[in-house]
Amino acid sequence: MLRIKTPKSLRAKRELEKRAPKLVERGKKTLILHGTKTSNTLNAVLTEIYHLKKDNAVKYSRRNDNIRPFESGGETSLEFYSLKTDCSLFVYGSHSKKRPDNLVIGRTYDHHIYDLVEIGVENFKSMSSCSYDKKLAPLIGSKPFFAFIGEGFENVEELKHLKEVLLDLFRGQVVSNLNLAGLDRVYVCTAVSSNKVLFTHCALRLKKSGTVVPRVELVEVGPSMDLVVRRHRLPDEGLKKEAHKVPHELIKKKEKNVSKDAIAGKIGKIYVPDQQVGSASLPFTPKGVKRERREAKAKGEDKKHAEKKQK
């Protein structure tokens, strides 16, 4: 592992501050690596993924013999490169007779392997092979849409795991506000079977519809491929619990008598105390009440006179 040194210059100090944990993290960086042997198809796939994430990715072209995911001792180099490049996602490509055109997509937590998904690439179609108007080409760094079609993404464990990893890989930086005019791409994932997904990258084309809402058309811009899930490894429960911890500074204090609804928005409850109607002061005194008081007062004076006479 890398030794931790005290920074001796302001530049080194700034670099360490960038890598230090933050309350709100930036977008995740992706590390792209080659295995001992790779095919032409796999080299093209890794290059296309790098172009899709060019603003937030690091690509190594040298072959790595010591990296063997899913094997004990074969993940040490992966964790080393993750720490060196400050990447929390990695894509590792390898090719063999047993597993041709093999991709391993994984996530790290604190630069340790968090989970892994191994997929095979079939029927690959590159960006250059797609014919379309170049004005529709998505911009680098734009936020994408995601469309997951099929019940397998909700029922099958392997596809649920693949869905989480693909979202982390291509969604970019998490933002609170988004300009709809800047949305120019969509990733369409269709579950064909329990272990096969059709992955397509399309550009959005807005056309007139006669209403305020435009009509949306999808134009395939590549890459597109079939992903076959071969192996996957879920995170350890202890590591998962630690990774999902939320800092105390980001935990919102609970507001009493306030709830939120997706449709109605913010809903509040107001508690009104019981009204004491009998003891409430009236703005005017009715005439009948005055007459009763005069009669009661006159009766009281008569009783006093009678008592004095008896004495």
Image (cartoon, rainbow, N blue to C red):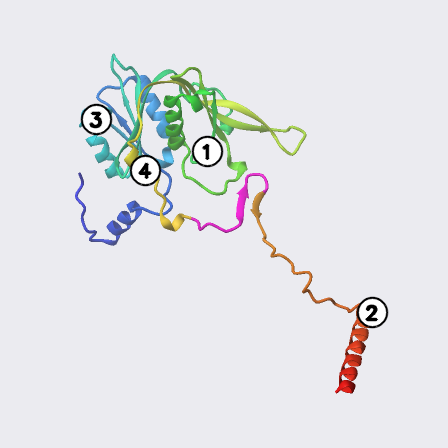
At x 26%, y 19%, the residue is: 38
Q: Which disc number belongs to residue 287?
A: 2
Q: Along the line of sight, which residue is nearer the eye, 171 or 240?
A: 240
Q: Is residue 74 left or right of residue 226?
A: left
Q: Quadrant of the N terminus?
A: top left
Name the residue tied to disc 3.
67
Residues in magenta, as a range: 252-264
Where does residue 290 sit, x and y in percent of width and height? 80, 72
- Packing grade of label 3 (10 A; few <14, some 14-19, many >=20) is many
Q: What secondary structure is found at the residue carrying circle 2?
A: helix
> What amino acid is labelled 3 in the image?
Ile
In front: label 3 or label 1? 3
Q: Is residue 154 visible?
A: yes
Numbered-mark total: 4
Q: Which disc number belongs to residue 139?
A: 1
Name the residue tied to disc 4.
241
